[in-house]
Amino acid sequence: MSLQPILLLPDNRLRLISDPVRAVDDGVRTLMDDMLETMYDAPGIGLAAIQIAVSKRVVVIDVAKREGEEQEEVKNPIYLVNPEIVRVSDEISTYEEGCLSIPDYYAEVARPAKVRVRYLDRAGTMQEMDADGVLATCIQHELDHLDGVLFIDHLSRLKRDRVLKRFNKDAKRRLD
Ligand code: GNR
Ligand code: NI
């Protein structure tokens, strides 16, 4: 297992449409292990493969509470390969979102409150899962990444342009 660097805005690779996985093999499982390690280290509650520069339709999520009664870690990793949202609720909910590729920026995003997602699990078996709450938000945020969409794309143009400007500036400063 290895910790990988996370791509940051304005890296254009974050805009790629990721490729479907042909088979869930050991290579894909190693990728998922690296993603999970990188996500826990950050720390974050979800990660799409493109955030570590791998353009494949692979997502890992863990929205479990980080600490249990006696401070021990409670882990509940979810592995999604080739995920598709097959049903969304009419009900909308709004969450304050952040993204490991857009550090230190948070904004409210409105999305369907509940989703049903179809995916291949770690063993390559097709599964369906119903999600609500923060898990539903996280699934939609991660699936957006697979299509090169970032949460700032759901904001007003004014807010999005402000964030893009800030990150372009930061990137230039890093070159000086
Ligand atoms: O760690 C993360 N937290 C989060 C909070 C609200 C909505 C979505 C997220 S996902 C984010 C990690 C990330 O960038 N995943 O792509
Ligand atoms: Ni993100």
Image (tube, rainbow, N blue to C red):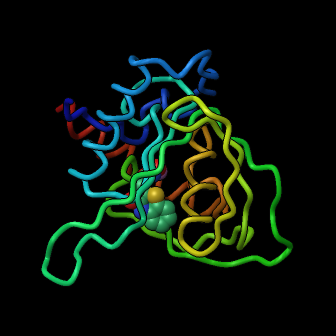
> Picture quarter containing residue 125?
top right
Is 156 on the left or on the right of 168, as rendered? right
Seen from this angle, which residue lies furthest bottom?
A: 69
Q: Nearer the viewer, residue 79 or 124?
A: 124
Spot occupied by residue 76 in the image (x, y as percentages of width and height): 38, 59
Seen from this angle, which residue lies furthest right?
A: 90
Q: Nearer the viewer, residue 53 or 72?
A: 72
> Picture quarter containing residue 147?
top right
Is 140 on the left or on the right of 88, as rendered? left
Residue at 49% x, 29% y is 12
Residue at 28% x, 67% y is 74
Spot occupied by residue 23 in the image (x, y as percentages of width and height): 58, 17
Q: Is residue 63 placed above or below 167 in the rendered structure?
A: below
Q: Nearer the viewer, residue 138 or 126?
A: 126
Is 4 on the left or on the right of 81, as rendered? left
Report the quarter where the C terminus lies: top left
Total tally of numbered discs in the picture: 0
Report the quarter where the N terminus lies: top left
Spot occupied by residue 116 in the image (x, y as percentages of width and height): 74, 57
Can residue 98 be seen in the rendering of this structure?
no
Q: Is residue 146 placed above or below 43 in the rendered structure?
A: above
Q: Nearer the viewer, residue 26 or 105?
A: 26
Can residue 144 be seen in the rendering of this structure?
yes
Spot occupied by residue 64 in the image (x, y as percentages of width and height): 38, 68
Residue at 59% x, 26% y is 18
